[in-house]
Image: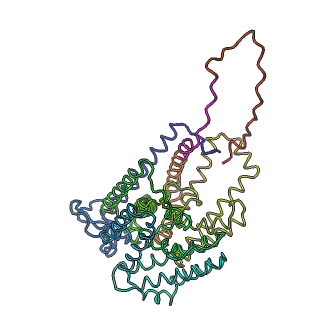
Amino acid sequence: MGIKAALPKYEIYFYNTMLCLAMFWAASWIFEVSSYSYLLPQVSTSVLASKLTANANRKTFKTTVKPGWYYFGRKMDTADFEWMMWFSTFREHILFALSGHVLFAKICTMLAPQYRSLVYMVYGLLAVWTSMGWTYVTLILSHCILLYSISLVKIRWLCFVTGLCTLATFKCEPFVSWQAGFVEGDFELRHVLFYGGCGFTIMRCMSFALENCERKEGNYSILELLKYNFYLPFFYFGPIMTFDKFYVQANKSDLTRKEREMWNISMQGLIHLGVIIVVDVLFHFMYILTIPTDMKLLKHLSDWALVGLAYLNLVYDWVKAAVMFGVINTVSRLDHLDPPKPPKCITLLYVFAETHFDRGINDWLCKYVYDYLGGKHDKVVEELVATLCTFGVTILWLGPCEVVLIWAFFNCFGLNFELWTAKLFSMEPFASFEMAMSEAMSRRVRAIFNTFNFWSIVLYNILALNSLDFAKLVTKRLLLKGFPITTIIVMFMTYCLIQVIKERERRQALIDDPDPLPRAPPPNATPSLTSAPAAPAAAQPVPDPSKEKAE
């Protein structure tokens, strides 16, 4: 089946209608739970409301549901520390640091554009020094010097092993406590900035070392490494931009912008501001982050509420990553850089190969591990080795623990299972069965299999985002306790979602690669009865139907 296989319009309209109804229905359950579990117990008149009020853990809600915007008359879900840090608690500090970077970068670009990357480094170094102290800067510089020295040997595996060992020192005792002692002062962001700055520094230094190994003649200077590492917008929170891309873009001499580029950057900033406001408003009405932490309350929720919570938690995590990285990317685009794109929306994912929440880390892993070991990703053994090594590095990056190990195992299995399934169904008699189908029917059959794949992605990833207990409860309700009614209904709604995604991909494919139009006959060509018969046209090759239907 080709990606351009179309379905009847009335069928697509039906899928969109059913999907919208399901979304509103699940959201209504979550809204009712949020209203009656803690905020408005005095008006709980329904049986459901009284049951929820009786079983809600008030300590959980008092900790994370706090006063929000006064004119809403409701409290706000503040369970996500990262979101509150960025857009509430330390909003002024982050804006001040980024605004200073933009100001000095603009002045330098106007007066001495050839030194702009050096100005980025100096400003970033001073900002890190001011926020974390000179001893922390010394720690970062020591790691940079170590990995730079190893890169001079130009042995790829040695650079990789050294980098991973250095990264491991921030994940195990007593190395963590010893290095944490280099941070001066005691403030709320100390823990976050320490691990963020150190972790991303190691990944950037590894990228530099591996790119230096690939360089045929000479070596990059250590000054280029410091420019790369101390670029402030990327320093603490990412995203990671591989050294080869940063080096070319930060040192290019042509700083002219494309037509309407500044307009696009401005619109991108306004869109991020609008999304921040919308998310803050929704946090007043749906406590999607606090409710999953109260297992006593979760056991009394409906199947629809649980399924909706699982799905919305993944959507929110994507929105958070897209906005946080989007704000940083907007600043870096003002510096004439092309940063990693935001992650692909979880709503549009139904294959493990495209599942990621940080495109910078994903690009880094693909470039240096997954694609390097996996080749074309069409051989079972090579793919297995590549995925095992990729998730091994990911486990070390996230920090080894029970939840991360389970998450990595299931995602690694899902990625390999997709290849095994593709290999199996490319054999006979499955290939002949699909060739006998119409393209529309083939698309429907594939969407059925993608439906189960979609919920595998959802269930595997709420392990990392929420907790193991929440993932177990959702799985039990969806597949065991809710079988067959809840299971069939949810899977059918997911099937509608998959078809909507495929329709969007089909339209995008038609835009990117439009079908060639038939050649029009010459306008003045008229048939002549007395003229000699024309020579037969050259025989056109008959298209192979197996290639037309190939994915």
Q: Is residue 29 left or right of residue 386?
A: left
Which residue is found at the position 42% from the left and 61% from the top?
Answer: 335
Q: Which residues are magenta?
A: 505-521
Q: Which picture quadrant has residue 531?
A: top right
Relative image position of residue 500 (x, y in whole percent): 51, 47
Q: Answer above or below: position of 353 versus 446.
A: below
Quadrant showing the N terminus = top right
Name the residue nearer the viewer: 173 or 306.
173
Q: How was this image coloured?
A: rainbow
Relative image position of residue 305 (x, y in whole percent): 41, 60
Relative image position of residue 507 (x, y in whole percent): 53, 42
Relative image position of residue 251 (x, y in whole percent): 50, 64
How many numbered marks does the figure carry?
0
Which residue is found at the position 48% from the left and 41% from the top?
Answer: 14
| In magenta segment, residue 22 | no
In the orientation shown, which residue stands out farthest toward the top? 530
Q: Which picture quadrant has residue 63?
A: bottom left
Residue 204 at least partly seen: yes
Name the residue nearer the viewer: 414 or 173.
173
Q: Answer above or below: position of 358 versus 191.
A: above
Q: Is residue 266 left or right of residue 396?
A: left
Name the residue nearer the viewer: 533 or 288.
533
Q: Is residue 76 left or right of residue 198?
A: left
Residue 55 at least partly seen: no
Q: Answer above or below: position of 293 versus 138.
A: above
